[in-house]
Image (cartoon, grey):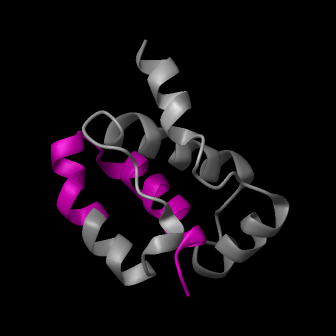
């Protein structure tokens, strides 16, 4: 059920394309398509458990850095998973 809900909530979020990976590598040299997709999935499932995930294009990189730091403890997202969520969100953040 949680996976089905996560898939529903993720429907409006940007999906990862090759150009997104290249853009992500400017800030995160280790970025890959798989890492960005993992960040998207974690964001959808963990953050989407409490509220509809916000479209990453609606906030700036700085706003996402703050939001991820603030909300990660509540969502139980730490370490590498937190880094992947931040990579996904900031890759699509408003410029």
In this view, the residue farthest toward the right is: 18
Measured as percent of width and height from the top left, residue 86 is found at: 44, 62
Instruction: Please tell me whether residue 78 belongs to the stretch shown in magenta.
Output: yes
Quadrant that contains the N terminus: top left
Which is more toward the observer, 16 or 57?
57
How many marks the image carries: the answer is 0
Find residue 16 and report its horizontal and vertical position in percent.
72, 54
Location of residue 28 in the rendering, given as x and y in whole percent from the top left corner: 59, 72
The magenta stretch is: 68-95
Residue at the image point whose x is 64% and y is 55% from the top: 14
As displayed, is residue 91 above or below residue 83? Answer: below
Q: Which residue occupies the foreground of this view, 83 or 56? A: 56
What is the magenta segment's predominant secondary structure? helix
> In this rendering, would 49 be left or right of 19?
left
Left or right, 8 with reference to 25? left
Residue at position x 37%, y 53% in the image: 82
In the rendered image, which quarter is residue 49 located in? top left
Q: Is residue 33 above or below residue 10?
A: below
Q: Position of residue 5 (x, y in %)?
A: 45, 24
Q: Residue at x 71, y 56 (%)?
A: 32
- Residue 18 colored in magenta in the image: no
Q: Is residue 16 left or right of residue 87?
A: right
Q: Residue furthest bottom?
A: 95
User: In the visual, does 47 lie left or right of 9?
Assistant: left
What is the quadrant of the C terminus in the image? bottom right
| Position above or below: 26 against 15 | below
């Amino acid at each position: 059920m949680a996976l089905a809900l996560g898939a529903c909530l993720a429907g409006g979020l940007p999906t990862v394309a090759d150009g997104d990976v290249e853009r992500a590598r400017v800030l995160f040299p280790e970025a890959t398509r798989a890492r960005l997709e993992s960040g998207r999935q974690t964001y959808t499932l963990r953050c989407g458990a409490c509220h509809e995930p916000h479209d990453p294009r609606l906030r700036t990189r700085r706003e996402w850095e703050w939001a991820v730091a603030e909300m990660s403890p509540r969502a139980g997202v730490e370490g590498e998973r937190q880094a992947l969520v931040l990579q996904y969100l900031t890759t699509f953040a408003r410029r």
